[in-house]
């Protein structure tokens, strides 16, 4: 069908622009010289403009109109219909947004990320504030052109998790926050901590961490023939179909890099295991950011912080860090699952992590409802940290400046992490039922069956299905926070000897 072939040609052109933009984004956060920011911002702004012009072109509009005629639509197969659905959504969502606004957003995001890195290293919120204000202003302007459901923030949520709204997020987050806070209080009331002191005040050479991280990535299935691992200030992953880049950061005072590696490799394996036959088509991408985060959090937590995984990991750690030889895998399992309020989101334990997300969600919602001024975010952050976690950051770097997202104008992204935890727990419950030997396999360092299950059931399908439909297909249930809460209660009642 001529109109469908034309639609796929346009989709392929769009994807090539996206690949190029991803490569530029990876470079600017890894190897780009500091003095290149201005030129890079102009490059990305131009490419984003070209992408937007093509996405909202009369050429694509004509294809969509032709394919939606009943005589043509009925002849499309399920994948073709899904492709039409997805590109129509992308087209309609952005159609009214001016080209020059897309340019301004891209330019400000590049400049903002560069300033954020410096401001974070100096713990100087005032230095970053003008860029935060600019990004918020631009995103509010962007939301004004989007057909959102109830409020401007809905337009931003929908960009990462299609169909999400603030009303829906609050309905999901409300019960979860209360249940998690109760568990945190119960654990905090105890006078002992499993694995306490094992990793405290120890040295973990960065070169050794890097080598371990590369081995972990290889063992769980990240393909270095189609990807690479590099250093950055804030870990991230970019997928370019045949080329997937993951990044990590390292601290000689701890080994949290192992878990951020598992997180990014989880993202990376999702990207590497999309169906190549779908590359360049509208469905040849991940289904939603919440689903993407479900895979990173699966490998980081449901796998990486499991007792079975520690049986595989501990001998390697003891070989490299000899002081661990006087401990056992059980001791280390307790240490990596220690529950305690922490300042840094990416280092937070499973129980308190979603409270970090709730804090950021509250602030973003307040900013886009004009209830919080950008200049107030540092103080509001500190107040929210005390409210949710009972601790207060002493520096901006430990608080409002710790995440890269706002510098890149990625407002609406943070809820995807919490959705990822919820999706991940629900999906992993199904995985355990369908792979009863999973613990035995993981303890031996065999992750093939798990990875293949995820590949065949999630990764390969791209955007053939909407996220809620895919979750229901995989688990037989709609999104339900009880899967995560039950997982946490079962696991941490055993670790801490509690009865929740």
Image: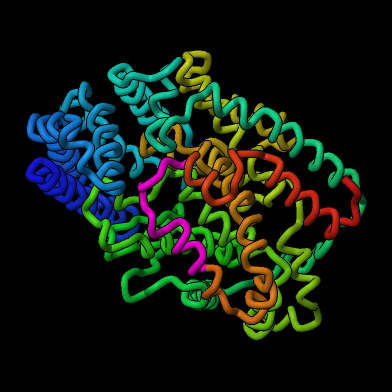
Residue 499 lies, in percent from the top left, at 91, 49
Q: Residue at x 79, y 42 (%)?
A: 184
The chosen color scheme is rainbow
Q: Tell me which secondary structure the magenta stretch mostly adopts.
A: helix
Q: Is 319 on the left-hand or right-hand side of 369? A: right
Note whether residue 298 is visible: yes
From the viewer's side, name the closer residue of 436 and 273: 436
Is residue 69 shown above or below 33?
above
Q: Residue at x 56, y 62 (%)?
A: 299
Q: Residue at x 64, y 77 (%)?
A: 441
From the viewer's side, name the closer residue of 17 and 84: 84
Q: Residue at x 47, y 76 (%)?
A: 218
Residue 385 lies, in percent from the top left, at 67, 33
Quadrant of res 59: top left
Note whether residue 35 is visible: no
Residue 157 lies, in percent from the top left, at 44, 30
Is residue 24 shown above or below 204?
above
- The part of the chain drawn in magenta is 451-467
Magenta stretch encompasses residue 398: no
Q: Is 291 on the left-hand or right-hand side of 132? A: right
Residue 195 lies, in percent from the top left, at 81, 65
Quadrant of res 62: top left
Quadrant of res 155: top left
From the viewer's side, name the closer residue of 4 and 409: 4
From the viewer's side, name the closer residue of 71 and 410: 71
Q: Is 118 on the left-hand or right-hand side of 209? A: left
Magenta stretch encompasses residue 462: yes
């Amino acid at each position: 069908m001529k109109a469908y072939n034309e639609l796929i040609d346009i989709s392929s052109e769009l994807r090539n622009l996206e690949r190029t933009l991803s490569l530029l984004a990876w470079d600017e956060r890894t190897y780009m010289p500091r003095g290149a920011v201005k030129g890079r911002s102009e490059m990305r702004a131009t490419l984003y403009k070209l992408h937007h012009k093509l996405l909202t072109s009369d050429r694509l509009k004509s294809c969509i109109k032709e394919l939606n005629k009943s005589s043509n639509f009925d002849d499309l197969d399920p994948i073709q219909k899904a492709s039409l659905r997805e590109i129509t959504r992308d087209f309609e969502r952005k159609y009214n947004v001016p080209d020059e606004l897309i340019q301004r957003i891209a330019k400000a995001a590049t400049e903002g990320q560069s300033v954020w890195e410096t401001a974070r290293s100096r713990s100087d919120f005032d230095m970053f504030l003008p860029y935060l204000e600019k990004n918020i202003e631009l995103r509010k302007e962007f939301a004004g052109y989007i057909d959102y459901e109830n409020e401007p923030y809905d337009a931003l949520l929908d960009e990462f998790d299609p169909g999400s709204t603030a009303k829906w997020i609050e309905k999901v987050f409300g019960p979860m926050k209360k249940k998690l806070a109760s568990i945190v209080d119960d654990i905090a009331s105890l006078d002992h901590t499993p694995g306490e002191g094992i990793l405290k005040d120890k040295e973990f050479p960065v070169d050794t961490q890097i080598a371990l991280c590369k081995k972990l990535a290889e063992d769980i299935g990240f393909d270095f023939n189609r990807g690479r691992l590099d250093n950055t200030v804030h870990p991230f992953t970019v997928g370019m179909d045949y080329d997937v880049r993951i990044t990590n950061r390292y601290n000689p005072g701890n080994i949290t890099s192992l878990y951020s590696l598992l997180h990014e490799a989880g993202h990376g394996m999702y990207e590497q295991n999309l169906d190549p036959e779908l590359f360049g088509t509208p469905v040849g991408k991940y289904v939603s950011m919440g689903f993407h985060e479900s895979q990173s959090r699966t490998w980081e937590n449901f796998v990486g912080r499991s007792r079975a995984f520690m049986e595989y990991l501990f001998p390697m750690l003891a070989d490299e860090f000899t002081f661990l030889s006087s401990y056992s895998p059980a001791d280390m399992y307790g240490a990596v699952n220690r529950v305690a309020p922490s300042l840094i989101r990416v280092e937070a334990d499973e129980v308190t992590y979603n409270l970090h997300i709730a804090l950021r969600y509250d602030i973003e919602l307040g900013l886009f409802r004009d209830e919080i001024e950008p200049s107030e975010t540092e103080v509001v952050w500190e107040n929210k940290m005390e409210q949710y976690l009972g601790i207060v950051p002493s520096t901006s770097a430990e608080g409002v400046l710790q995440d890269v997202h706002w510098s890149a104008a990625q407002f609406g992204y943070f809820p995807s992490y919490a959705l990822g935890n919820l999706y991940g727990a629900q999906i992993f419950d199904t995985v355990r039922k369908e792979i009863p030997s999973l613990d035995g396999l993981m303890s031996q360092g065999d992750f093939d069956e798990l990875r293949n299950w995820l590949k065949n059931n999630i990764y390969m399908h791209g955007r053939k299905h909407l996220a809620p439909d895919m979750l229901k297909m995989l688990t037989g249930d709609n999104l339900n926070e009880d899967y995560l809460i039950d997982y946490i209660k079962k696991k941490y009642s055993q670790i801490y000897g509690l009865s929740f």
